[in-house]
Image (cartoon, rainbow, N blue to C red):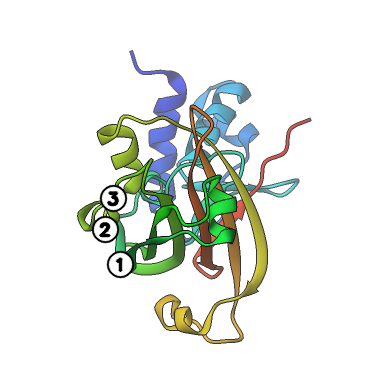
Amino acid sequence: MKPKYMTLVEALESMIQSMGKNEMIPSERVLAKEHNLSRMTVRKAIDYLVDQNKLYRVNKVGTFTTDEKLYKKVDAFSGFTNEVRRAGGEPSSELIEYSLQAANKHIAANLGIKEGDLIYKVIRLRKKNGVPIMIDEAHFPQAIIPLNEQVVTGSIYDYIQNTLGLKIVTANQRFKATFAKKEYQKYLEIDELTPVIRTELHVYLEDGRIFEFNHGYINTDRYEIVSKSYQ
């Protein structure tokens, strides 16, 4: 038997499809009365749709339908491909650079390897439904993550987990407001005065090894980072 909250989820999804972007849906109290459900059940349905990036909450205001941005919650981590798919979009990548090179001092320190060890450098333009969202510059130790061109044009994380059988357990991320490198502006379809979010990412395997050091440049008009706090 289908859980009550999922029946409400389906009803809300139909309602969302008939609404515009950034429109407020009825309150939990109103929905509970209309559907003869408890507030807890209504909240669970809304939580589900928030996690699916179909709704978002504004504290002390209400719950709204999402716009065309891709939302990233900083209390959870997954690869870009899975983020886009969860949002109901189609992910794709344009390969800008793929090379095998010796790690310099900076890259080696961030990957926990020796200077001169071989690493893959992968620069990709990431898209949702064909629309440029972000560019990432990723570095992977060859000794841990053997790559090829076919892999880097798809989901590297799916390859790591499903083909190599390695478990990704955690990531440390930093965010900074800045401007994109000149050579990246055309890819992101922005000009030199458009701010971007620069991310710095270290991703760890179950055994504690860092397998990726990454810099990302995000078009803020098409991507939003959402933080959730707990008391």
Q: First in sequence: mark 3 or mark 1?
A: 1
Residue 138 x %, y %: 44, 58
What is the quadrant of the N terminus in the image? top left
Q: Residues within 10 Å of mark 1 (few under 14, many from 20)?
A: some
Total numbered badges shown on the rendered structure? 3
Rendered image: mark on residue 153: 2
- Does 187 sit above or below residue 52? below
Q: First in sequence: mark 3 or mark 2?
A: 3
Depth check, front residue: 198 or 230: 198
Residue 71 x %, y %: 52, 53
Q: Nearer the viewer, mark 3 or mark 2?
A: 3
Q: CA distance from mark 2 to mark 1?
A: 6 Å
Q: Amino acid at mark 3?
A: Leu
Residue that protrudes farthest toward the left in the picture? 150
Q: Amino acid at mark 2?
A: Thr
* Residue linked to disc 1: 95
* Residue linked to disc 3: 147
The reply to whether residue 92 is visible in this rendering is: yes
Q: CA distance from mark 3 to mark 1?
A: 14 Å
Which residue is painted at 53% across and 86% down in the image?
Answer: 191
Q: Nearer the viewer, mark 3 or mark 1?
A: 3
Q: Residues within 10 Å of mark 3 (few under 14, many from 20)?
A: some
Which element is circle 3 on? loop
- Does 44 sit above or below residue 229? above
Q: Is residue 156 left or right of residue 23?
A: left
Which residue is painted at 62% across and 25% down in the image?
Answer: 39
The reply to whether residue 130 is visible in this rendering is: no
Q: Are marks 2 and 1 in contact (CB under 8 Å)?
A: yes
Q: CA distance from mark 3 to mark 2?
A: 11 Å
Depth check, front residue: 25 or 203: 203
